[in-house]
Amino acid sequence: MTTKEILDAFVKAVDVEKTYTSAELVKILKSSAKGSVSKGENGEPVEKTKKAPSAYNLFVKDFMLNPENEKIPPKDRMKAATVQWKQQKETSSVPVAA
């Protein structure tokens, strides 16, 4: 795809009446470079919906933001969160009778 084609796609995807953040403009530009700008019924770019965070994601977020753990370096905090998640998962698992 040529630069002109990318810019043309970008210009078509951007609504000059709307205010965009720089991150949104970068997303639109990247999708224009790929040649596949998803558009809604009215021709505006459509944002992808994010899937909900998993239980693990929520646990790690809470663990990382816990004030008791702030003194631990982030790398070590992540390792500790993983260990605690595994321990919690093992203790909360209920064996299924066959």
Image (spheres, helix red, strand yellow):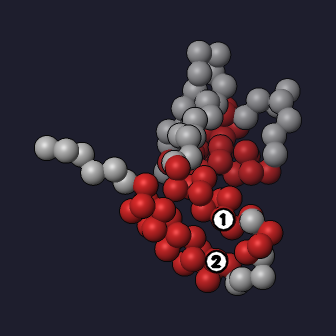
At x 37%, y 54%, the residue is: 93
Q: How many neighbours does mark 1 have within 10 angstroms: few (below 14), some (14-19), or many (20 or more)?
A: many
**Which quadrant of the view contains residue 65?**
bottom right
In percent of the image, x 73 and y 34: which residue is there? Answer: 14
Can you see residue 51? yes
- In the figure, 42 relative to 55: above or below? above
Residue 41 screen position, x and y as percent? 59, 15
Q: Amino acid at mark 2?
A: Arg
Sequence-first disc among 1 and 2: 1
Q: Is residue 22 left or right of residue 81?
A: right
Q: Amino acid at mark 1?
A: Phe
Circles 1 and 2, Cβ within 8 Å, touching? The answer is yes
Res 9 → quadrant: top right
Look at the picture and state if 1 lies above or below 75: above
Residue 30 versus residue 49 in the image, above or below:
below
- Badge 2 crowding class, 10 Å Cα cut-off, few under 14, some 14 to 19, many 20 or more, is some
Q: Position of residue 81 (x, y in %)?
A: 57, 70
Identify the residue at horizontal 57%, vertical 77% (top origin): 80
Q: Which type of secondary structure does the marked residue at label 1 adopt?
A: helix
Residue 95 in picture, x, y percent from top left:
27, 51
Q: Which residue in the rendered view is the most extreme toward the top?
A: 41
Instruction: Name the residue nearer the viewer: 25 or 7.
Output: 25
> 22 or 86: which is nearer to us?
86
Left or right, 91 with respect to 77, comes to left
Left or right of residue 75, residue 68 in this image: right
Image quarter (top left, top right, bottom left or bottom right) of the C terminus? top left
Instruction: Give the residue number, with chain letter if any, for mark 1.
Output: 63
Residue linked to disc 2: 77
Gap in angstroms between the C-alphas marked 1 and 2 = 8 Å
Instruction: Using the image as rendered, state which of residue 89 and residue 15 is in the foreground.
Output: 89
Image coords of residue 74 (percent x, y) = 68, 78
